Image (tube, rainbow, N blue to C red):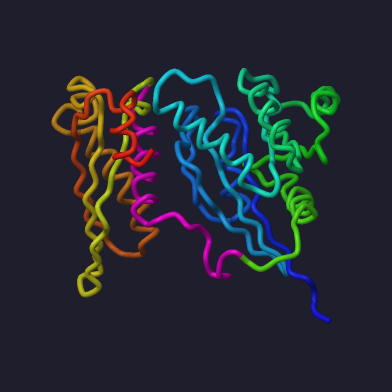
Amino acid sequence: MGMTFLAGFIAIVGPPNVGKSTLLNRLTGSKLAIVSPKPQTTRNRITGVYHGDGYQIVFMDTPGIHKTHTALHRSMVASAQATFNEVDALAVMIEMPRPEDPGIPIVLSNLRRAQKPSILVINKIDKGHRERLLPIIDTYRQRYPFEAIIPVSALTGDGIERLLEQFKSMLKPGHPFFPSDMMTDQSEAFWVSEIIREKIYACTRQELPYSCAVTVEPAEENPEKNLVSIMARIHVESESQKGILIGGKGKMVKAIGQASREELEKFFRMKVFLDLTVRVEKNWSKDPRALRRLGY
């Protein structure tokens, strides 16, 4: 009699900027989610598939759960909260240097309603003294009956093997959800738009990245020329933001384009022609219709 195959969906949830996307990338061994030191980088749910020996875990990276102020933020948080009822188990993520966050009570409230198996992942143990862990673990044991509390460093990989074993124990018998060569269900255009957005975060300061959205036309490949042509548009909310993003003599948008192109060429393994333009779409982050049009 053959071994029973195990499979399941596990959502990675928590406040902004605790390392959820870094954890997804570490678990899958591939860059599926963009990362940035700036909070609220992840805006959409991103799926990553881990293929184990006799099992498959479908991870869902979610936007950070926080108090909302705009239609965009409400859309992000609603997307994250919806996963509580859509998955088999939950990995709640906090960070050791900042174990208390205004979003945590919201996360725990959703957990209590969902009644799903859950573990607590304490990330960034490489950022502080290990003796701080025990008080954090004790506090959270009293706050919620997690099945396990596991300290990790998503950046260095410390604790990841133990975490995977815990995830495996939470799976159920079933069939794989995705073929063995599939890492994500995200479209190519979505991934390209995320890479460009990541470079906007890296190249610009303060609030500007939060006022930008990126849309991308389907890429056109020319194998004979070993070339991929991509048309992308950065949407901002005001003329002043457009001026900052373009920069003097177009320097800023050129820097964003160059950084994006370098990463995209590694992905496509071809030369990339990136046509990057900037368009003003007034107050798009506050307009539900604009949000839907831009993919939120």
Q: Residue furthest left?
A: 249
183 falls in the magenta region? yes
28 falls in the magenta region? no
Location of the N terminus (image quadrant): bottom right
Specify whether 59 is left or right of 276: right
Find residue 237 and report its horizontal and vertical position in percent: 25, 25
Q: Kindly identify the residue that appears in the image at 73 percent across and 64 percent down.
A: 6
Find residue 249 and report its horizontal and vertical position in percent: 13, 31
Q: Kindly identify the residue that appears in the image at 34 percent across and 30 percent down.
A: 288
Above or below residue 158? Residue 1 is below
**Total numbered labels placed on residues in the image:** 0
Q: Which quarter of the figure has residue 152? A: top right
Location of the C terminus (image quadrant): top left
Above or below residue 225? Residue 199 is above
Above or below residue 16? Residue 52 is below
Toward the viewer: 136 or 74?
74
Toward the viewer: 74 or 156?
74
